[in-house]
Image (tube, rainbow, N blue to C red):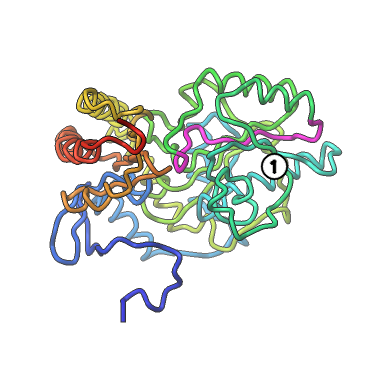
Amino acid sequence: MPASAPLMSTYARLPVAFSHGDGPWLFDTDGRRYLDCLSGIAVNTLGYNHPRLSAALREQVGRVIHTSNLFEIPLQTQLGQMLVDRAAMTNAFFCNSGLEANEAAIKLARLYGHKRGIERPEIVVYEKAFHGRSLATLSATGNAKVQKGFEPLVEGFVRVEINDIAALRTIAAERPNVVAVFLEAIQGEGGIRPATPEYLREVRALCDSQGWLLMIDEVQCGTGRTGKWFAHQWAGIVPDVMPLAKGLGSGVPIGAVLAHGAAAEAFQPGNHGTTFGGNPLAMRAGVTTIEVMEDEGLMERAAHLGAAIMAEISRGLADTGALVEVRGRGLMIGVELDRPCAELVRMALDAGLILNVTAERVVRLLPPLIFEQAHADLLVERLLPLLRRIVATPAPGKA
């Protein structure tokens, strides 16, 4: 009987199990070593077995793991202050995951709308977006495949294409119940598709003129991955609501929602809550992650290494005619080919690389932020021959 027999069939797992890790390396149960270029889907910011994180978590486990939000949690206050200082925002709510953070943002927007006298508030969301798999976040997600079978979806969402400001202005003119715009600064599951800095600035201005909340999902692209604390900061703007998760805890489950302006005052006692969210262990992981990132200059390194990796891959595939685009920022990179390339994931495993493919034809690279130049060089050295094998034959429909 397969080892997964007691588990629900929710994942198409790859046939490898990892026993331990060190830095950017993972080791499987057969002792084979892999360069991790996915970091648990943008989660393991500090890689594996970082001495400062491991020591902090061991110490915290020996103190207290959970008390509940019925009591003061000093580490919540510390991490909340660290985040709002770096985001130029006002306050934070802590939860356990990106889904929960996005769900809280949706609730906050609806509450904001009701306080303005709008009975059926609407939120603008985006094609190809991904915000989670609860019924509300699934409904906000722009992917019919992951929504199929879970209808009826939650109402109150209006969908547009990313980087199309004209479409958003049309909604402003035609839909008086809109209260918020909700988008990813860089769409992760949608194929590493960035909102341009110009578009983000235009959306910020439109939200200001309409009295809408600007809610930017930084679950995957935040916490230093792009070379700034939060990806929207490349546009020089401040959102009203910002969900975070993934890399904030370097592997310990954590989520957060930061708020600014009127949104910061929307939630009052009884409006929202969580049992496990903001527990001392997760808060210690978040505090330590931020401290290590600053002490080791990991954001600056992410910006530098990401630009170098993108340039090398672009050069290495320039003569193939099969490269659509290399895009992203920092250590959040998408390599779009002119054909589906899901088989690359197993090919990469055989070559000692961990990566994945999203949106069918986009190779997604999300290395841990402790990557160094030698790791970036090895990534390119191992990946380029695999990509060239994938594109060696004409894509379907091409001569």
Counting every numbered tag in the picture gives: 1
Above or below for 218 versus 164: below
Image x and y of residue 300, in percent: 31, 27
The residue singled out by tag 1 in the image is 157
Residue 166, quarter of picture = top right
Residue 181, quarter of picture = top right
Quick check: 258 left or right of 304?
right
Residue at the image point whose x is 73% and y is 56% from the top: 270
Along the line of sight, which residue is nearer the eye, 103 or 353?
A: 353
Give amino acid for label 1.
Phe
**Residue 151: in sight, yes or no?**
yes
Q: Quadrant of the N terminus?
A: bottom left
Secondary structure category for the residue under label 1: strand
Along the line of sight, which residue is nearer the eye, 151 or 236?
A: 151
Q: Which residues are magenta?
A: 175-190
In magenta segment, residue 169? no
Along the line of sight, which residue is nearer the eye, 72 or 58?
A: 58
Above or below for 107 versus 212: below
Quick check: 204 left or right of 227?
right
Image x and y of residue 354, in percent: 25, 49
Image x and y of residue 161, in percent: 59, 31
Quick check: 155 left or right of 103?
right
Residue at the image point whose x is 42% and y is 74% from the top: 7
Quick check: 337 left or right of 352?
right
**Residue 332: in sight, yes or no?**
no
Q: Quadrant of the C terminus?
A: top left
Above or below for 217 versus 73: above
Farthest residue to the front: give it: 399
Residue at the image point whose x is 62% and y is 36% from the top: 182
